[in-house]
Image (spheres, grey):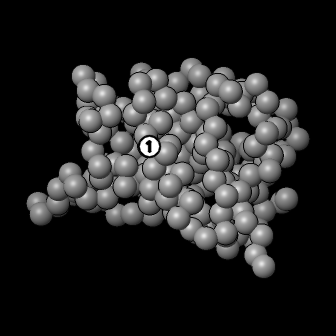
């Protein structure tokens, strides 16, 4: 019998859009057999980041505010300093997702921030693995990876709308990221753990 792999989705969400992405990431990961998935609010897990130690993979999500991750998420990152110093998350798989109201919104800066955080912890980054879905004349906003990210899942939500302002394709893209990480973590045999 195969032992289930544990995936933690750690996220912050100011207005609910990134939380919707987190749920989609979790659903995608949970669709893969032999995975256990749990969602964690960054603010809560910042009080004790060691509650993530059992996870084989961590998928990080934060809204993009002013070209960066949220202050709440950065507090979680800083709270993991003792774990970083001992390199206790080394070898875990990692991935990331973000949302902003702008089509660009400098979301790549946030994904880069998440990637660097994972690299400092010695983690192994898993990118989105999807081609640009809307980069041709026959493309549309209904396609996966409509915003053309490779580093992680990006979503765009209108600033004057709630969850109804989110594109279904962005949520399906988030789900695809979760599924991709889960497939990798189930077959993962590496890492200094």
Foreground residue among 45 and 116: 45
Residue at image point 34% right, 63% down: 131
In the rendered image of this protein, does residue 163 appear above or below residue 128?
Answer: above
In the rendered image of this protein, does residue 184 appear above or below residue 140?
Answer: below
Residue 92, picture quadrant: bottom right
Whether residue 70 is visible: yes
Residue farthest toward the right in the current orientation of the protein: 86
Under circle 1, the secondary element is helix
Q: Quadrant of the C terminus?
A: bottom right
Residue farthest toward the bottom in the current orientation of the protein: 1
Total number of numbered discs in the rendering: 1
Residue at image point 61% right, 71% down: 33
Whether residue 93 is visible: no
Left or right of residue 188: residue 32:
left
Q: Quadrant of the N terminus?
A: bottom right
Residue at image point 26% right, 35% down: 164
Residue 155, picture quadrant: top left
Residue farthest toward the front in the current orientation of the protein: 1
Q: Residues within 10 Å of mark 1 (few under 14, many from 20)?
A: many
Residue 190 x, y percent position in the rendering: 76, 68
Residue 151 x, y percent position in the rendering: 47, 51
Residue 118, picture quadrant: top right
Residue 77 x, y percent position in the rendering: 68, 31
In the rendered image of this protein, does residue 165 appear above or below residue 92?
Answer: above
Residue at image point 31% right, 58% down: 144
Q: Residue tagged by mark 1?
A: 21
Left or right of residue 14: residue 49:
right
Foreground residue among 192 and 62: 62
Foreground residue among 45 and 60: 45
């Amino acid at each position: 019998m195969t032992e289930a792999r544990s995936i933690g989705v750690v996220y912050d969400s100011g207005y609910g859009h990134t939380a919707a992405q987190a749920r989609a990431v979790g659903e995608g990961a949970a669709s893969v057999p032999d995975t256990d998935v749990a969602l964690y609010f960054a603010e809560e897990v910042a009080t004790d980041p060691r509650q993530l130690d059992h996870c084989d993979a961590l998928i990080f999500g934060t809204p993009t505010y002013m070209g960066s991750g949220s202050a709440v998420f950065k507090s979680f990152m800083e709270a993991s300093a003792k774990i970083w110093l001992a390199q206790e998350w080394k070898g875990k798989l990692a991935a990331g997702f973000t949302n902003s109201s702008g089509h660009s919104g400098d979301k790549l800066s946030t994904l880069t921030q998440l990637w660097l955080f994972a690299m400092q912890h010695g983690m192994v980054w898993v990118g989105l693995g999807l081609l640009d879905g809307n980069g041709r004349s026959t493309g549309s906003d209904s396609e996966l990876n409509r915003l053309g990210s490779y580093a992680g899942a990006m979503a765009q939500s209108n600033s004057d709308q709630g969850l109804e302002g989110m594109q279904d394709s962005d949520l399906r893209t988030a789900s695809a990221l979760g599924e991709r990480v889960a497939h990798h973590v189930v077959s993962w045999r590496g890492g200094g753990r």
